[in-house]
Image (cartoon, helix red, strand yellow):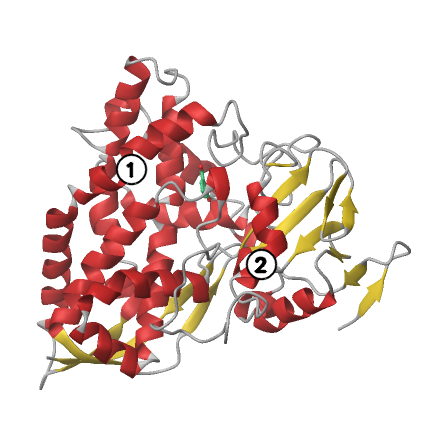
Amino acid sequence: MTSTLTRSGLPVLDADPFSPEVLADPLSFQEQLREAGPVVVLAKYGVYALGRYAEVKSALTDWQSFESGAGVGLTNFRTEKPWRPPSLLLEADPPHHDAPRSVLAKILGPRQIAQLREAWEADAADLVDTLLARARGGVLEFDGVAELSGAYPLRVFPDAVGIASEGRENLLPYGDMAFNAFGPHNALVERDADRVESLSLWVNAHCARDALTGTGFGAQIWEAADRGDITHEQAPLIVRSLLTAGVDTTVNGIGAFLHAVATHPDAWARLRREPELIRGAFDETVRVESPVQSFFRTATRDVEIGGTIIPEGAKLVLFLGSANHDPRRWEDPHIFSLDRDPSGHVGYGFGIHQCVGQHVARAEAAAVLGALARRVKSIELAGSPVRHLNNTLRSWKSLPLRMALA
Ligand code: OVM
């Protein structure tokens, strides 16, 4: 791998962060990126890249200079057509961004989500009990993705939004497609080209008012439109954000946690003794695994960062996963540790776009991981886990686990 300099003295990397090899194991690319300099040019895509914690965090904070409205993927919405109408939250800037954001932040706020806790814990207990009933001699081998991390969010989140049961199998493929779409038009995007239309039709149909039952998050978004907090035209697109970003993210966060504890038996033993540490442990998982690896921004002016001027209109990619492994910020950054304070990590982003669903993610994780901690004495890998590749997500396709009942 080469690292050369442009005429302005800027380091250039030829490596492709969206290649199958780097997606499968991004740590060495990330180290190369951080070591090359605070701002690097990715030759293959002609974009700037940030891999160090300090610059990633300051670019996330400075939304005036680094806009989201031109898209937070490689595609520049000012010059190229987005694959779907832009998100009113993710792909928008103040002032347009603010009303949708504050409506959704209230609906998904910590108090609101705390009210779901008992029901979600009961659902988690039920899922885990049914799974563990298959144990023989107190031991069970199973796929942690198929049976736990990929199952639990689908069991609670679509109900909380208020969509019908039929067609929920479309949610994970749609999210996978949306997260791939932030990257380049590579084989991962091409593979789903013939599904974009049917998956989008299904998701869009479920954003309509009459497709959303009862008192769910979706119905509450429409009620906010009735109150005039947002327009009725905005409501379905805000529901679409929930259906896009609400499932794959938590599936991968919970999957990352299962992998972390299966490979750190002492941590699991401690979490069983001190279950109040589970929430912090999940945050450490989000830091170390960074289920969302990267997002792009676009410079709104010639703007200096890390001693480099990024020209107006240029795209830059912010590697959240790399920032979360920057040794300039974290001691032994690659190590999952219950003794570390992971706060300040950028796994949920930072600033005005920081994950609006993070209380949902934490509540789901706490429910399912708490249910496991009460019932399972030990967790270990029962085979080699297999990665699922995505241009943005760090994901497991399968996670063979062996659990011993308490
Ligand atoms: C959205 C959205 C928000 C966060 C992540 C994301 C596909 C989408 O508002 O649609 O990834």
Q: Amino acid at mark 1?
A: Leu
Q: Which of the 4 image quadrants contains residue 70?
A: top right
Taking the image as shown, residue 356 lies to the left or right of residue 182, namely left
Q: Quadrant of the C terminus?
A: bottom left
Q: Residue at x 28, y 14 (%)?
A: 226
Q: Is residue 290 above or below residue 69?
A: below
Q: Position of residue 117 (x, y in %)?
A: 15, 48
Mark 1 CB within 8 Å of ligand 1: no
Density class for disc 1 (Cα within 10 Å; few <14, some 14-19, many ≥20) is some
Q: Amino acid at mark 2?
A: Tyr
Q: Position of residue 343 (x, y in %)?
A: 41, 58
Residue 57 vs residue 128, the one in the foreground: 57
Q: Residue 370: give its label.
A: none
Give the foreground label among 1 and 2. 2
Q: Residue at x 22, y 42 (%)?
A: 113
Taking the image as shown, residue 76 lies to the left or right of residue 159, namely right
Identify residue for label 1. 108
Outermost residue, bottom side: 137
Identify residue for label 2. 53
